Amino acid sequence: MWKIAVGFAVFAGLALFILSKGGDIDMSGEKHGDTTHTEAPATTVAPASAAKAASAP
């Protein structure tokens, strides 16, 4: 039985060590309505420049 307790303590210590070295880790759970994350707008080729490139000799 004592081996289980020692194994748990070692595993918990290792987990805390790894989490402390990980940097900014948010363990607070799922966020709803968080507007700080925005996706970059998709870049597309303008139709005018595509037509100009197609008609060039």
Image: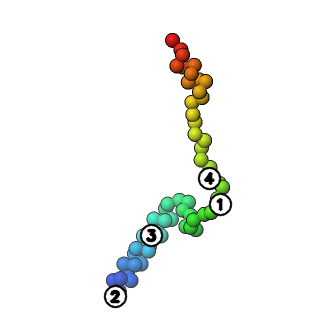
* Residue at position x 40%, y 73% in the image: 11
Residue matched to label 1:
33
Give the structural element (helix, strand or loop) at label 4. loop
Of circles 2 and 1, which is in front? Answer: 1
Name the residue type under label 4.
Answer: His
Of circles 2 and 4, which is in front? Answer: 4
Density class for disc 1 (Cα within 10 Å; few <14, some 14-19, many ≥20) is few
- Where residue 42 appears, x then y in whole percent? 58, 39
Q: Earlier in the sequence, mark 3 or mark 1?
A: 3
- Of residues 29 and 48, the one nearer the viewer is 48
In this rendering, is residue 51 above or below 18?
above
Q: Earlier in the sequence, mark 2 or mark 3?
A: 2
Residue matched to label 4:
37
* Residue at position x 37%, y 81% in the image: 6
Quarter of the view holding residue 5: bottom left
Q: Earlier in the sequence, mark 2 or mark 4?
A: 2
Give the structural element (helix, strand or loop) at label 1. loop
Residue matched to label 2:
1
Residue matched to label 3:
15
- Where residue 10 appears, x then y in whole percent? 40, 75
Density class for disc 4 (Cα within 10 Å; few <14, some 14-19, many ≥20) is few
Disc 2 to disc 4, C-alpha distance: 48 Å
